[in-house]
Amino acid sequence: MFKGALFDLDGVIADTAVYHFTAWRNLVKKHFDAELPDDLEEKTKGVSREDSLKVILDYLNIQVSEEEFAALAAEKNDAYVEALDDLTADDILPGIAKLISDFKHHGVKLALASASKNGPVILDKLGLSDAFDAIADPGQVAAGKPAPDIFLAAAEVINLTPQDCIGLEDSVAGVTAINDAGSISIACGGSELNHAHKRFDSTADFTYDAILKAWQEQAKT
Ligand code: B16
Ligand code: MG
């Protein structure tokens, strides 16, 4: 039986991914009068603010100074944080509140393994801060997703080995990070996440029983 659950935030606990990409789109429109294609969103999912900006500037083939880079990242974050203003517990994705309460009922420890530096604020707005035993700090890890660091840190802050944990993710980079950390990856999303140990279509399919079954199947292999 697994002892810990390492949660991604954007796209797993709340649908804040759309706010991230809208903020990037508006920034790029304002500063460079350019549009971002839909498929760039997946390349920024789970990826840190700075790495997301690099992906976007590479796509646009634009070079900026270090100062401009920092100013763009800060402006995007201000717009994103403003968009979070109205976030409430109603924005928790389907199935997640029940899953969290079932995990707690079964003594599973919970840690946040989000790339977002806004994680604590978002958990607070969703009324979930007390449900989590610990939050891994993305500002303290050497490398962002797809590197395993944030999931290794998340297991460590709840005093467990990654092998005793499952990781929940919605991004290609995040699933790779969980796998490389040595945890069992449980994903929600399309076939781009087929590298997960178990993939479901949506968070509504993330039930305690389904996840336990996925864990037991993996334990047999
Ligand atoms: P911030 P996750 C990630 O969160 C987002 O998916 C990604 O789009 C964002 O760039 C990253 O957090 C950093 O967020 O700018 O708020 O620090 O999916 O790992 O929970
Ligand atoms: Mg995510």
Image (cartoon, rainbow, N blue to C red):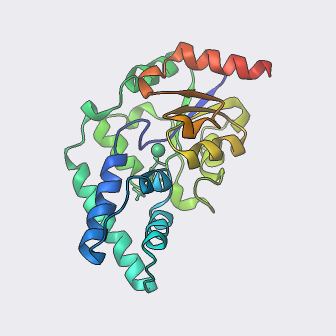
Q: Write the residue at 60% across / 59% down.
A: 141
Q: Is 54 in front, or is 158?
A: 54
146 w.r.t. 100: above or below:
below
| Quadrant of residue 67 within the rendered picture | bottom left
Q: Write the residue at 43% across / 84% down.
A: 64
- Kindly tell me whether residue 1 is visible in this rendering: no
Can you give x and y, in whole percent of width and height, for residue 148 in the image? 66, 50
Can you give x and y, in whole percent of width and height, for residue 2 in the image? 66, 24
Can you give x and y, in whole percent of width and height, for residue 8 in the image? 49, 41
172 w.r.t. 7: above or below:
below
- Kindly tell me whether residue 137 is visible in this rendering: yes
Point out the residue furthest to the right here.
Answer: 221
Q: Is 194 in front, or is 179?
A: 194
Can you give x and y, in whole percent of width and height, for residue 65 in the image? 44, 86
Q: Is 107 in front, or is 183?
A: 183
24 w.r.t. 95: above or below:
below
Quadrant where the N terminus sits is top right
Q: Write the residue at 58% across / 20% down.
A: 211
Q: Write the residue at 73% across / 34% down.
A: 163
Quadrant where the C terminus sits is top right
| Quadrant of residue 100 within the rendered picture | top left
How many numbered marks have been drawn onto this rendered protein structure?
Answer: 0
57 w.r.t. 97: above or below:
below
| Quadrant of residue 34 within the rendered picture | bottom left
